[in-house]
Amino acid sequence: MKQDYYEILGISKKATPAEIKKAYRQKAVEFHPDKNPGNKAAEEKFKKAAEAYEILSNDNKKARYDQYGHAAFENGGGGGGYGGGGMNMDDIFSQFGDIFGGGFGGGSFGGQSRGRARVKGSNLRIRVKLTLEEIANGVEKKVKVRRKVMAEGATYKTCTTCNGAGQVMRVTNTILGRMQSASTCPTCHGAGEILDKRPKNADSDGLEFKEETVSIKIPAGVTEGVQLKVNGKGNAAPGNNAIDGDLIVVIEEIAHETLKREGTNLHFDLYINFSEAVLGISKNIDTVTGKVKIKIEPGTQSGKILRLRGKGLPSIDNYGNGDLLIHINVWTPQILSTEQEAFFEANKKDENFKPNPSKLDKSFFEKVKDMFS
């Protein structure tokens, strides 16, 4: 089981953005590879802290994590904010400009150069529609994605403007002395490389569009609007040192014909006729895992709710399944034959036909209260 992100940073769920940033800064300094050379345990803690910060520093991701835990970012058993592929050092050091106010420069610590940050391609976003049955069981979807990839035959060379550093240095004379500042290279845009050989079918960055079939593993229990991330299936970026963007998968839910969803619970409206309500009957009911047979007891009143425990949808946090609530509606006939009219007229004042609710027969408001409690 993955370690809780709040626990990794040593903070509470009520921590402010400033406290989250401060906690990560402390962990990053404590476990930085330059301060712990050859220490694999420290390096692992360094990566975990960076992954935790990547999620908790983003309001949207933090809200999803607070609601669904690690499962909000999983893709068939994947990990945290990086889609299960883990974080590499370039991803982590790319955060330092924000965390350390540029004190780490282009990725340096303790005077040792880390080199330029890797350029990452843009993300792609698609929507995937799921039925309630697919949501209940989890599903693997194969989708076609049109994404930018490096064209065959494209080659790159070191940028002559920044000599591969990705940054250009500028020295300014001030009254306080000579001040040195760094900015992103205007030629290679920080990549450190420029296109050398461009194939005919490639764009100015040496990239071309190709259609690719991507397999997406969707965990059970997802909800409308949940976003999953497939690492490295977005657009490519130019250069030999670049990494591909990600594919963002937005979940859409297809409305079911008979079942209505409320969180992990499902609702089903069952209509029975007057005779069935009086005499009782067995009925087959739709669920997300097939049909189940239920028994309607004789004398069942309209508005009664039957609860089938565990027949709802699974929780994305593995907290178990919700319930299926069956709402009984007794259908009153509107057109009667002469014989039927005579029968009901004769029994209108019969003691068995007089309303006589007991304490067990809850009012409408009590039923609504029970349903939402």
Image (cartoon, grey):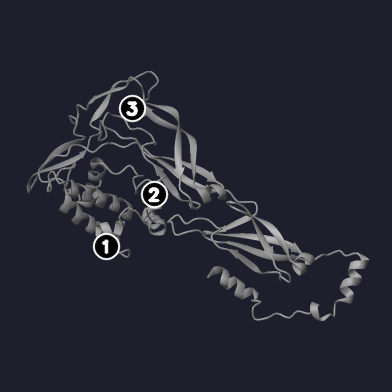
Q: Residue at x 89, y 71 (%)?
A: 343
Q: Residue at x 53, y 51 (%)?
A: 136
Disc 3 to disc 2, how far (Cα)? 31 Å
Describe the element under mark 2 as helix, strand or loop.
helix
Sequence-first tag of 1 and 2: 1
Residue 252, position as x, y percentages in the image: 52, 48
Dividing the picture into quarters, in which one does residue 287 lie? bottom right
> Amino acid under label 1?
Ile
Describe the element under mark 1 as helix, strand or loop.
loop
Instruction: Identify the residue under disc 2.
Output: 73
Residue 342, position as x, y percentages in the image: 91, 71
Instruction: Identify the residue under disc 3.
Output: 205
Dividing the picture into quarters, in which one does residue 117 lie? top left
Disc 1 to disc 2, how far (Cα)? 21 Å
Image vertical order of residue 352 relative to residue 44, above or below = below
Describe the element under mark 3 as helix, strand or loop.
loop
Choose mark 3 or mark 2, whichever is in front.
Answer: 2
Instruction: Identify the residue under disc 1.
Output: 11
Residue 170 badge = none
**Labels 3 and 2 touching (C-beta < 8 A):** no
Crowdedness near tag 1: few (<14), some (14–19) or many (≥20) residues, C-alpha within 10 Å: some
> Amino acid under label 2?
Phe
Q: Residue at x 24, y 61 (%)?
A: 10
> Amino acid under label 3?
Asp
Residue 290, position as x, y percentages in the image: 61, 51
Crowdedness near tag 3: few (<14), some (14–19) or many (≥20) residues, C-alpha within 10 Å: some
